[in-house]
Amino acid sequence: MGILTDEMQRFIEATGHAFVASSDATGYPHLAAGRDLHVRDDSHLIFEAWFCHTTMENVTANPKVAVAVTAPAADRGYQFGGVVESAADTAIMDGFTGEEEDSAIPQVQYRLIIRVEKVMEFTSGMHSDQPS
């Protein structure tokens, strides 16, 4: 039996955005946002986004991540702790945006497959950090 309930799956699919926290090999944290988070099965998330180079360096050095999905107006959400099992690029910008670029690094869209190991509430109200 998996860790992601039907209720969690519906919430993830309906929310439309999420945040992923990663850290480098020394533990220094980094937070990224994206809009394409989906449930692959009852134990895995698929997060596809235009992650920056720092996120990808971090998950290569330390595959443990936390993914937060929240509906701020309802003050409810979930934090999923897990491990990135695979990371692959799915698209690369052609370099033309019509505006001057700030960076010489091309923008790349990546797909992270995350095996969820722990689920906790994610809210600003009273809550416990105990797994759901």
Image: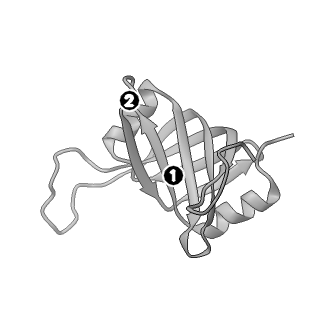
Within 10 Å of disc 1 (Cα), the crowding (few <14, some 14-19, many 20+) is: many
Q: Which residue is mark 1?
A: 48
Mark 1 secondary-structure assignment: strand
Answer with left or right where residue 116 lies relative to residue 30.
right
Quarter of the image where one finds residue 38: bottom right
Q: Earlier in the sequence, mark 2 or mark 1?
A: 2
**Residue 24 marker:** 2
Position of residue 119 measured from the top left corner of the image (x, y, whole percent): 69, 45
Amino acid type, label 1 = Glu
* The N terminus sits in image quarter: top right
- Residue at 54 percent of width and 42 percent of height: 66
- Residue at 80 percent of width and 53 percent of height: 5
Position of residue 110 measured from the top left corner of the image (x, y, whole percent): 45, 46
Quarter of the image where one finds residue 121: bottom right
Position of residue 41 measured from the top left corner of the image (x, y, whole percent): 75, 47
Quarter of the image where one finds residue 9: bottom right
Answer with left or right where residue 118 lies relative to residue 107.
right
Amino acid type, label 2 = Asp
Q: Give the color scheme: rainbow, by chain, secondary structure or one colour.
A: one colour
Q: Residue furthest right?
A: 1
Q: Is residue 82 above or below residue 98?
A: above
Position of residue 111 measured from the top left corner of the image (x, y, whole percent): 51, 45
- Residue at 53 percent of width and 59 percent of height: 36
Within 10 Å of disc 2 (Cα), the crowding (few <14, some 14-19, many 20+) is: some
Pick whichever, 95 or 5, lies toward us. 5
Q: Residue furthest bottom?
A: 73
Q: Residue furthest left?
A: 100
Answer with left or right where residue 3 lies relative to residue 47.
right
